Amino acid sequence: MKQIKDFITSKKFIIVIVLIGLIISGFAGSYYYMKKSEKERQEELFLLEQKKLEDERLIKENIINNAQKNVANLYDEADIPKNDISDEEINQVIIDVNLVEDEEIKSTLLKQINEVNEYRSVLKNIDSLFIDNVLISTTNDNDIKMLQDSIDKLQDKWKNDCNEKLNNMRKQRSNILDADKKVKALFSDSKLTIVKTNVTRNKYNSVKNVVNKLPQKDLKKKYNEDLDKVLKEIEEREEKARKEAEEKARKEAEIKASWVKLDVPYISQNKNQIYNGCEAASLLMGLQYKGYLKDASLKYIADEMPKSEDDPHIGFVRDIYGFEPRDVPHWIAPDALAKFGRSISGNNKIKDITGTNVEGLKKEIDKGNPVIIYATGGNFDDPINWVEEVPKNVHVMLLVGYNPKSNQMLINDPWTKTSTGQVYISLDRFTTIYNEIGKKAVVVG
C-alpha cells in the first residue's frame, strides 16, 4: 500500500499522469479535428457539386444561345432567309441545334431551319429555271404551277421576292408562247417548211421583232432559222413580183404604144336630152373630127335629120327625142344616115359600108376615118325583140380606135355623160354583136 502511495507521489506517477493526459488530449483533439474536417469536406463537396451544376447549366445555356444565334444568323435584317447561305452553313447550324438538350427549344429551332431550307429549296428551284433572270426555254406551265404551289406554303413576308421572280418567269413564258405561235402562223404546215402565201415583209418584220426581244438565246437562234426561211421565200416572191411588175409595165407600155386612136371630140345624146339621137351624135362627132360643122349643135342635126313613118332607109323612124313606144327601135338605117351626112355637111366621103368585117373597120381607123357602127346598148348586150331589121335595144356608136396587142376596140358611146364617153370593149364581144346586128356601118371619110 505504501509502495502504491509512494508511487503516486513520485515523479514517475506525475509523468505517467501527464502522458495519459496528453494521450487523452491528443485523442480528443484528433477526434475534434476529424469531426471538423468531415464537415468542411462535405461543405466543399456540396460547393463543388453546385459549381458543377452551375457549369453544366451555363454550358447548356451557351449551347442554346449559340444555337439560337446561329439560327438567327440565317436571316437578314428583314427577317428573311439570306440568299447566300451554303449547305455547309446549314449543316453546321443543325449540328449546333442538335446539341441542345431542351427538346422544346430544339424542336422550335429545327422547325425554323426546316422553313429556311424550304425557302432555299424554292429559290433553288426558281434559280434552276431562271438563270441570270432568263427563263430556260424548256420550262413549261406545269413547272411554273409547281413553283407557285411551293411559294404559297412559305411565310407571307418571304413570298414577295419569290413571286416577283415567278411573275417575270410567267411574262417570259408568255413571250415565248407568243413568239412560237407567231412564227408557226407564218407557215402552212406543222414542219414549218411551207411559207403561207399571204405572209408579207411587214408581217415578217413584226414577228422578227417579237423573236429578237426574247432573252433565250437558244430559242432566238431556232426561231431566226425559221424566219430565215420566211425571209428567203419573201425575197423570192418579191423578186418574182418585181419581174412580173416590170413585165406588166412593159406589156402595158407596149399595149399603150400599140393603140391606134383617133382624137375625136365627144358629144352626149343623154346630156343633150335627145334620148334617141345616137345616130345624130355619132355622125356629128365624126364630122367635127373631120373639120365639118364645128359650130353645129346636136339639136340642129337631130332636127335636120329626115324622118319617116315606117321606112328607116328614108329617114328616122319614130321619136328621136323621146322613149315611146318602148317595145320597138327608134332609128335610121346606115344608107339613109350616110346620105343625110353628105347632104348636111358637103362631105362626100361619108359612105355606107354595111357588110364590112371588123378587119375592114380597123383599116378605116388606120386611114384616120372614124366609123359609125350599129350594135346594142348597155355593154354590147345581147340583141332582144327584133323589129324590122334591128333589135329593140339597137344602139349606134362611133368606133375611134383599136389595139392589136390587147385585142380591144375603143368606142365613143354618145349615151354616157362622162367627159370622154370612151368605152373599151373586147374584140371578141365587139365582133359578135357587130356581126349579129348585120355588120351595119357608116364611115366618115
Image: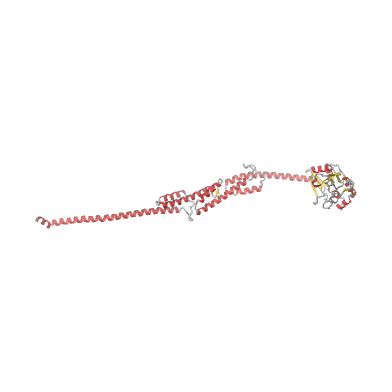
Q: Position of residue 356 (x, y in %)?
A: 85, 42
Residue at x 72%, y 44% (from the top left corner): 244
Q: Position of residue 411 (x, y in %)?
A: 81, 47
Q: Nearer the viewer, residue 352 or 289?
A: 352
Taking the image as drawn, is residue 38 in sight?
Answer: yes
Q: Position of residue 65 (x, y in %)?
A: 41, 54
Residue at x 16%, y 56% (from the top left corner): 17
The quarter of the image holding the N terminus is: bottom left
Q: Position of residue 125 (x, y in %)?
A: 51, 48
Location of residue 14 by image quarter: bottom left
Residue at x 31%, y 55% (from the top left corner): 46
Locate residue 398 relative to residue 85 in the image: left or right.
Answer: right
Instruction: Name, please, the residue furthest toward the left.
Output: 2
Q: Nearer the viewer, residue 348 or 255?
A: 348
Taking the image as drawn, is residue 281 in sight?
Answer: no
Location of residue 429 by image quarter: top right
Q: Give the colour scheme shown.
A: secondary structure
Label total for image: 0
